[in-house]
Image (cartoon, rainbow, N blue to C red):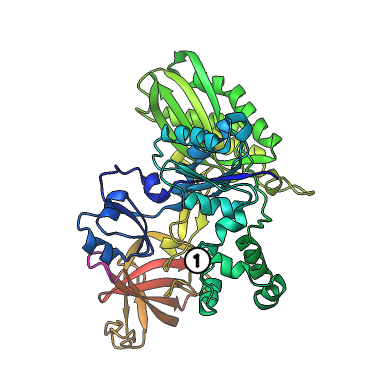
Amino acid sequence: MARTMVLWAPDWPIVAVDVPASVPAAVIDKGQVLACSQAARSEGVRRGMRRRDAQSRCPGLVLHDHHPDADARAFEAVLTAIEELSPGVAPLRPGLCAIAVPSRFYGGEAEAAAVIAERLVGLGVWDVRAGVADGLFAAEQAARRALAQDSLVVPAGGSGEFLQDLPIDALDDADLVGLLRRMGLRTLGDFASLPPSDVHTRFGTHGALLHRLARGQDPHPISRRQVPPEFDATLVLEPPLDLVDPIAFSLRTTAEAFVTDLAGHGLVCTTVLIEVDADGSLASSRRWMHPRWFGPTDLVDRLRWQLSVQGAIRAPVDAVRLIPEVTEPLGDHADSLFGGGPDERVERGVARVQSIVGHESVVSVTVQGGRGPGERHLLTPWGERPVASRPAALPWPGSLPAPAPATVYPSPQQAMVVGAEGQPIGVSGRGVVTGEPARFRVAADQGWQPVAAWAGPWPVDDQWWDEAAARRIARFQVVGVDGSAFLMIVEGGQWWTEARYD
C-alpha cells in the first residue's frame, strides 16, 4: 500500500510575513492571534488569545493583519521546491502539504524527509516537520507530533495503534468533539472502539468517516495538484532599442505567441501587466485592462502608449514582459451565433485616435453608484475595464428616483426659489420645507418664472463623520410653466441648479 508523507511548517502566517526570529510578532485574524513567533510565545502569547490580552503579555508585540492570499503565494515557493525532489505534491492549506513517500529513491522514509527538510531550510523555512503513515490523517497527526526539523514515521499497518492514544480534539470537528466529550470519550481509541453501525446511525455519514479515520482507515487518496502552465512572454532586445516604434514593432511576434498560447489552453487575457526593462533594471510597469480581451494588436498599442509617456524611459530598452494577471475562459468572450461585442473597426478607429491624442483623452462613460447625478457618471479610458469606486448595487439613501436628468451642469448654477410673497424657501433641520415654492430662477442671469409643479425634498446628510467634507443638502425637482424641468439643491439656505430634464 502506498505510504503518505505530510510536511508541516508551524505558524505559517508568521513565516509568510518574514519577520526575524528574535522579534515577538503575531498575525491577527478577527481580533484573535492566529499565529505567533517563538519570541512572542516565550513571552506568553498563544494562538486564539485576544489582541488586548496578547499585548498585555508582550507590550512590544508586533502585529500583522492576516492576508490568506499572501500566505498562499508564499507557500507556492515551498510547493515548487518539493516538486523538484518528488513530483505530485498535494497542498492541503498554506503551511501543510502531502506527497507520496519517495522512500526507494532516497533510501528510506526518514531519509526522504531529511532531504526535503534540508531543501526547505535553504528557502528560509527553518522549522519543517514530517510525518509518515499509511493514510493522510495519520500522517498529519504524526507531523504535528514530530520534533522541529525531524520526522515521525508510523510503521506500516500501525496507524490505528498510533492514533488510539491521541486526544479526541485531533478530529478537528468542534461540534462532534464536544458531543463525544459529553459522552465520556476522551481519545481517538475510545471513539474507534464504538461499533461502526452504531456510529453511522447516531452521527450519520460524516461521523462514520471520522470514525474510520480514528481507526486508521483513511479512504482519502492524495489529490496531486496540476502545476499551472506559465503564460508569461518575454521579448529580449539585442541590442537594446531607444525608439518607441521599433520596440513596439519587435513585440508583435511575441504578442501573437502570447495570445496563441493562451487560446491553446482555452483562455483569453483581460488584464495584463507590461513590464519594461532598461539598462538591466525595471524601468516601467503598468497594469492594463480590456473590456473584452487582448489581441496582439491591442498589446502592441498598450506598449506604445506606455513607452510614450513623458520621461517613462530614460535608457535603451533591453526587455519587455507580458504577464497575464486575469485570464478567463475563451467561451465566455466568444461571439454568439448572431455575432456580438463591439465592431472591430470601431475599436481600431478609437484606438487610432487614442494613439494621436493620448490614452487618457478618449474615455467611455458608464454608471456607478451615488446620490447625485454628478456622482454617478464614471469616465474610463477607452480600452480599459471600468472600475467603480461606488458600486451601483448599493441602496444609496437620498438618491433620486427615475428618470435621471439628461443634462448635468459641470458646476451648479446659483439659483433662487421663493414663495408667493417673495419669502425665501428653505428646508429645516428635520427635512421639512419652510413654505410653498411659487417662483424660481435657474441662474443669476435668468428671469423668474412661476412654479408649475415641484417634488421633494430628498435630504442627504453626506460624510457626516468628516467635519471638513460633511454636507447637508436637500434636492428638489422643479417644473416651470413653460414645461422646463430642473433638479435643484438647497444647502445652507442657498439654492443651486444642478441638472436639467430634457
Circle 1 crowding by C-alpha within 10 Å: few under 14, some 14–19, many from 20: some
Residue found farthest to the right: 337
The spot of residue 269 in percent (x, y) is 60, 40
Magenta span of residues: 464-470
The residue identified by callout 1 is: 169
Residues 38 and 489: in front is 38
Residue 181 relative to residue 222: left or right: left
Residue 61 in the image: above or below residue 128: below
Residue 316 relative to residue 385: left or right: left
Q: Is residue 234 on the magenta stretch?
A: no
The answer to whether one can see residue 48 in this image is yes
Residues 344 and 246: in front is 246
- SS at mark 1 in the image: helix
Amino acid type at image mark 1: Asp
Residue found farthest to the left: 59
Quadrant (top left/top right/bottom left/bottom right) for the N terminus: top right
Residues 351 and 425: in front is 351
Q: Main secondary structure of the magenta part?
A: loop
